[in-house]
Amino acid sequence: MARDGMAPGRLDAATHWPGIIEVYRDFLPVGPSTPVVSLCEGATPLIEAPRLSERVGAEVYLKVEGANPTGSFKDRGMTMAISKACERGAKAVICASTGNTSASAAAYAARAGLSCAVLIPEGYIALGKLAQALIYGAKVLQVRANFDGALAIVRELAEKAPVTVVNSINPDRLEGQKSSSFEIVDVLGDAPDYCFIPVGNAGNITAYWRGFQEYEKAGRSTKLPAMMGFQAAGAAPIVVGHPVKSPDTVATAIRIGNPASWKGALDAAEGSGGSVRSVTDAQILDAYRFLAAQESVFCEPASAASVAGLLAYGAPAGSRVVCILTGNGLKDPDGAISQVSVPDAVDATLDDVLAGLDW
Ligand code: F0G
């Protein structure tokens, strides 16, 4: 945006976004001596969703967290976790992950010059996420376990080795992740009526709720949204009320049977007048395709759980709804390709191309 005295059409240095720590410093546990490790995460688009709004009869916005530097919301938490780890003199970090945490940890650790190890469930991580962790230079171990099993080993390991855990059990992670709520309020001018959000390990719903509460307390908003969390039906421990031993869902990012922030999710849902409910894989994939084809937002399957929840359960007429789209669709090319039919090649002649286009 051009400002007074600036030539239009040029990037305005005064409005450059320096990342969530610098922008929301007053709300974060950082001091003047905290070394800020940032990739300018945050300031993600909050876009109107006209077709979705029409379909559900509400005013719906999409918070596109896939626009973060490594393609997911994890970067908000990771800038905090890695900055604080550096402040405390850490040399190495570790996490268990369904993919996005590992990609983000690997990137921010590399930036800070820390070594990074990640444990991922064998066979259940989207290709793009695996590629990210490896290319950023993390030590990647595929374990023969699901996410819950991998996280249990990380917890055990952290007691024996001088290493900082950067899963969301690290409180610095949630501090960073709450910044998305601040952005939503800053852009809308107040909190929305409803916040729809996918739930896996349940850190993010906990963080968003904290962010909305802190901003309201600080007088930045006049109300709080109802927090509407959505788990995949085959991995819905909070909904069924007990851990799920073998969680299963096409949305591998939220394929989690025993969430670490279970209580945080319940507090968010109950404290806000919201709920945690489940959506089927079919509903998730319907929402996933709808978002790409109708709203031009390509998110990953787990992210679409928020919109699947909105489509399945609705929202009161005219209410203002924000759906959190947690990760970028490019992370999971196999997921996308499985939902479409890839065309065969045609010969490079005008006739063959016209025939192929069926015009
Ligand atoms: N959406 C995406 C794309 C995720 O990667 C995750 C979690 C969630 C939603 C759920 O967030 O765990 O805070 O409830 N991914 C973690 C990971 C578990 O290892 O990348 P949550």
Image: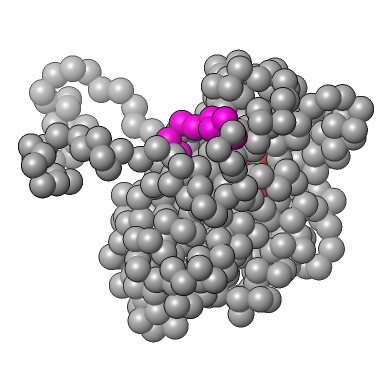
Name the one closer to the observer, 216 or 263: 216
Identify whether 336 is placed above or below 196.
Answer: above
Where does the C terminus fall, quadrant-wise?
top left
| Image position, residue 263 (x, y; %) | 77, 63
- Determine the residue positioned at 31% across, 72% down: 54
**Identity of the residue drawn at 72% across and 20% down:** 91
Relative placement, left or right, of 101 versus 235 is left
Give the main secondary structure, helix, strand or loop, of the magenta stretch.
loop
Location of residue 272 (image quadrant): bottom right
Q: Observer-nearest residue: 22 or 343?
A: 22
Q: Position of residue 82 (x, y in %)?
A: 63, 32
- In front here: 76 or 64? 76
**In the image, residue 106 above or below residue 46:** above
Q: Is residue 27 left or right of residue 174?
A: left
Name the residue rendered at 10%, 23% in the picture: 350
The span picked out in magenta is 34-41
Res. 335 visible in picture: no
User: What colour scheme was applied to this rendering of the protein?
Assistant: one colour
Image check: 149 left or right of 251? Answer: right
Report which quarter residue 97 is drawn in: top right
Q: Is residue 351 visible?
A: yes
In the image, residue 12 sits, relative to residue 314, either above or below, namely: above
Q: Which residue lies furthest to the front in this view?
A: 32
Q: Is residue 169 inside the magenta stretch?
A: no
Q: Where is residue 219? Give x, y as percent.
A: 46, 72
Q: In this view, does 103 lie to the left or right of 159?
A: left
Q: Residue at x 40, y 37 (%)?
A: 18
